[in-house]
Amino acid sequence: MNVVQFFLIMLLATVKTLLSPPVAYASGLTFWPTFIAISCGGIIGFLVTFLITNSLIRLWLKKRYNPKNLRKARKIVNLKKKYKLGVFLLFLPFFSVPVMAYVVRKFFGHSKRIIFLSCLIIVFWCLFFCLVYSPIQRI
């Protein structure tokens, strides 16, 4: 296993976990190094973005407050109340990791266990995609 390949796959996983397993298998990594690289990369990308977005949200709200956007914000809040956290976490692999970290921070940042739950969901999706894409390494 090449250390540079491992870190490049990890870097790719910080942005997009859905596309990382095929790239890792195509570059010659086996199942466990692929799973570890993608899980670590996804968690690192989530944590960095989650911690940075608080200051970005405050900065954005200072510059962009517009009363016309209240109707859109009310729709989003109604969706949040109706479907709770599960829907957002289930759609994690279809968005990039930074986008999902922003959404989780913006709407569920008040919860104390949200970081642990999000990291657990990232590991679950990484395991799922590594298993789904594992036949690629045999081709």
Image (cartoon, rainbow, N blue to C red):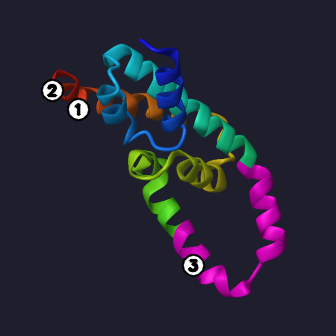
Element at label 1: helix
**Label 1 close to label 3 by CB (< 8 Å):** no
Alpha carbon separation for disc pair 2 and 3: 47 Å
| Residue on which disc 2 sits | 139
Q: Position of residue 48 (x, y in %)?
A: 68, 38
Residue 82 visible in this rendered orientation of the protein:
yes
Which residue is rendered at x = 43% and y = 57% of the image? Answer: 83
Which amino acid, by three-letter code, is at mark 2? Answer: Ile
Q: Residues within 10 Å of mark 3 (few under 14, many from 20)?
A: few
Give above or below for 23 relative to 71: above
Residue 132's disc number: 1
Which amino acid, by three-letter code, is at mark 1? Answer: Val
| Residue on which disc 3 sits | 72
Which residue is rendered at x = 40% and y = 45% of the image? Answer: 93
Specify the segment rendered in magenta: 53-77
Residue 34 counted in the magenta span: no
Element at label 3: helix
Residue nearest the observer in this picture, 99 or 71: 99
Is label 1 or label 3 in front?
Answer: 1
Residue nearest the observer in this picture, 82 or 68: 68
Decide if residue 106 is on the left or right side of residue 61: left
